[in-house]
Image (cartoon, rainbow, N blue to C red):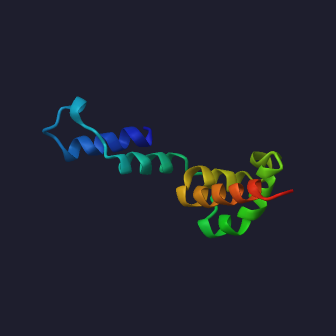
Amino acid sequence: MKLREAINRLVERMRPNKEESEMQLPAEFKKLIGMIEKTQEIELSCDEVYNLLDQYTEIVDRGENAHKLMPLVEHHIDICPDCREEFEALLRILQASPA
């Protein structure tokens, strides 16, 4: 059973008087489900990503294959809005600086 199906069944039990078509999960709950579904066996913490962020950003800025070179950092940035925001800010700074 997929995680989303299990959570939908749980929500059905919590709200037995609601018709299935009326049931809507809150946006925060959907976001959490999405993050859990994307979880990998090996993950980096925000602190670990922060320590590697300058290297990762330079790789992206040079147009190198960040997915191949730093896949765990890329995955974390894909699922963590705070780290993605830091990455995007750093990338904007690098792209704005004269070469």
Q: Quadrant of the N terminus?
A: top left
| Front-most of residues 49 and 95 | 95
Image x and y of residue 91, in percent = 71, 55
Number of numbered discs overlaid on the protein picture: 0
Image x and y of residue 69, in percent = 80, 51
Regarding residue 41, the answer to whether it shows in the image is no
Residue 19's image quarter?
top left
Q: Is residue 88 left or right of residue 60?
A: left
Regarding residue 5, the answer to whether it shows in the image is yes
Q: Quadrant of the C terminus?
A: bottom right
Q: Is residue 23 above or below residue 71?
A: above
Instruction: Residue at 78% x, 61% y: name it.
Output: 55
Instruction: Residue at 75% x, 64% y: name it.
Output: 54
Image x and y of residue 20, in percent = 23, 32
| Front-most of residues 97 and 12 | 97
Instruction: Residue at 63% x, 70% y: name it.
Output: 47
| Front-most of residues 82 and 91 | 91
Which residue is situated farthest in the front direction here? Answer: 98
Q: Is residue 42 left or right of residue 57?
A: left
